[in-house]
Amino acid sequence: MGKRIIQQARGKGSLTYRVRKKAFVYQMKYPKNLNGEGEVIKLLNSSAHSYPIAKIKYSGGSFYMPAFVGMAEGQKIEFNGNKIEFGNITALKNIPVKTQIYNIESRPFDGGKFVRSGGSSATVSRVVGESIFVMMPSKKEKKFHPDCRATIGTIAGAGRLDKPFVKAGKKYHLKKAKSKLWPRTSAVKMNAIDHPFGSGRGKNPKSKIAKRNAPPGAKVGLLRPRRTGKKKR
């Protein structure tokens, strides 16, 4: 009998593969009722995020958000106003075209979903009727509701990928902090007892469409594919 394959081991949720809860103590969300002015009371580091975190104090309490480039403790930021300055949080309808923004809400008042990695920013591209189009970091446009909120500026933490890891152990511990599996081994390089794609002369993976309700371990290969086969030009 073969060993349990990686999907089965991860599905069980042992300490090796489980998310380290202590790393994810900060929740990045805009409060629903956000008006007036706030103050940056502390800048924090989080091993679970690719950017520094800012703790913002406002009239209703405090919340956490990704820090922008140039943010400093004691700085004042404005909520739902028309002032276009770095760090200000406002609805997309108040932001002029060609302004850099981040932490954009998918739907009004959901707290922020898009453009949340270190060093990234999106740009308000155009306004068509009641819709606002934003150029995402992937260079693709996305349509948003005008009441969706965003933060003006660029997220801090750029350049973190420029320096090489040098040591394998360093990368292992970084991935472990974020509950990512590393090193990741190709299935066709495994033995037949360790994976459905294992062994095989010529190392060609067997074509396999996994059932939608397949258990961890059997759910490998093409997962809910829209199409299969080689594309014809």
Image: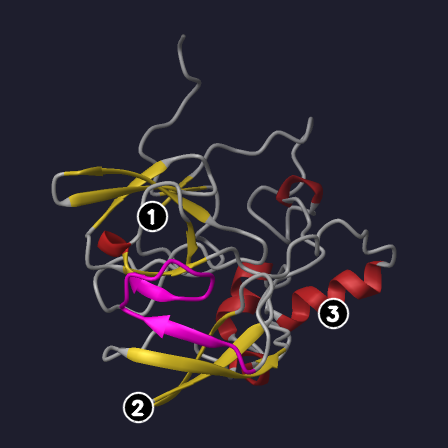
Mark 2 or mark 3, which is nearer the start of the sequence? 2
CA separation in Å, label 1 and label 3: 34 Å
Point 30% across, 90% down: residue: 60
Going by the numbered disc 3, the residue's amino acid type is His
Mark 1 or mark 3, whichever is nearer to me: 3
168 up-or-down from 32: above or below: above
What's the magenta region?
Answer: 74-90
Q: Specify the quadrant that holds the N terminus.
A: bottom right
Point 45% across, 66% down: residue: 87
Q: Residue 132, position in %: x, y?
A: 23, 44
CA separation in Å, label 3 and label 2: 38 Å
Mark 3 or mark 1, which is nearer the start of the sequence? 3
Point 46% across, 77% down: residue: 76
Secondary structure beneath disc 2? Answer: loop
Query: Can you see residue 18?
Result: no
Quarter of the image holding residue 142? top left
Name of the residue lying farthest toward the top: 233
Mark 1 or mark 2, which is nearer the start of the sequence? 2
